[in-house]
Structures are given as C-alpha cells and as structure tokens.
Image (tube, grey):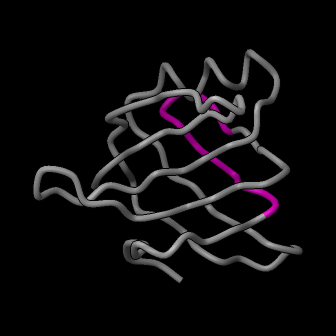
Amino acid sequence: MTGFPGPRPMHGDEVRLTTNTASVTFTGDVISQGVLRDGRGFVELTLPDVDPQQRREVEWAKRFQYELYRSGALLYSSPSLTLSETRRTSEGFLVIAGSP
C-alpha cells in the first residue's frame, strides 16, 4: 500500500526506516497515522524507545522513508518525507512527523 495514511492509526510490529544517512529497523509497537495541522497533512510515526544511536540517526535526518510491517506482511510503504518534528511521549516513545 502506498499513498498517504489516513487519520485512523495503523499498528505494526516492525518498521524499516531509511534516512539520508542510514537504514534502521525498529521492532515493537509501532503506530503510523495521518494528521492534519494548520491545513497541511503530516504522517506521524510512533516508534518504541531503542538504541540511542538509532534514535539520533532518525532525529538528525532531514528526509526519511519507511515501510510498516505486521507479522511480516507489508502494511504501508511511505513516499519520501521531509522531517518536520521529533518529540518524546511521556511513555518514552519517539514520535517523528513528516510530509511529502
């Protein structure tokens, strides 16, 4: 599936994320969701807390692309996105937001 995710969260157990400098895989509870802010569409990707180096690779990226999987099946393949925001939830999850 390609395109842009809608407002309904997609839950997966693995995401393969490619940035301008690295490719990293996150496993655990992963959520992908489309959001609308100030009239613009963004995708928010919520990632489990992992190795600090992997987290830095994502936080420092300018662009990223990802593939979301559940039980080995591809749920969603994003277009190339420009990173617009990174933040941490109170539970320690890393949330990144991007737009085409």
Q: How many marks?
A: 0
| Near-viewer residue (61 or 44) | 44
Q: Which residue occupies the foreground of this view, 17 or 11?
A: 11
Camera-side residue: 35 or 19? 35
**From the viewer's perspective, is 97 left or right of 88?**
left
Q: Is residue 61 above or below residue 29?
A: above
Please give the range of residues in magenta: 13-23
38 left or right, relative to 97: left
Image location (x, y in percent) of residue 25: 77, 44
Residue 98: x, y in percent?
Answer: 36, 46
The residue lying furthest to the right in this view is: 71
User: Magenta span has 19?
Assistant: yes
Residue drawn at the location 78% of the way across and 44% of the way down: 26
In-image side of 74 versus 51 (left or right): left
Quarter of the figure that contains the N terminus: bottom right
Considering every residue shown, the one lying at the far front of the view is 90
Kindly identify the residue that appears in the image at 67 percent across and 38 percent down: 23
**Magenta span dominant secondary structure:** strand
Q: Quadrant of residue 57?
A: top right
Which residue is painted at 67% across and 24% down in the image? 55
Identify the residue at the far left of this view.
39
Q: Judge whether 86 appears above or below 35 on screen.
A: above
Q: Quadrant of the C terminus?
A: bottom left
Q: Nearer the viewer, residue 69 or 87?
A: 87
Residue 92 lies, in percent from the top left, at 71, 28
* Up/down of 98 relative to 70, above or below: above
Q: State yes or no: residue 72 in magenta.
A: no
- Farthest residue to the bottom: give it: 1
Residue 34, percent from left and from top: 39, 64
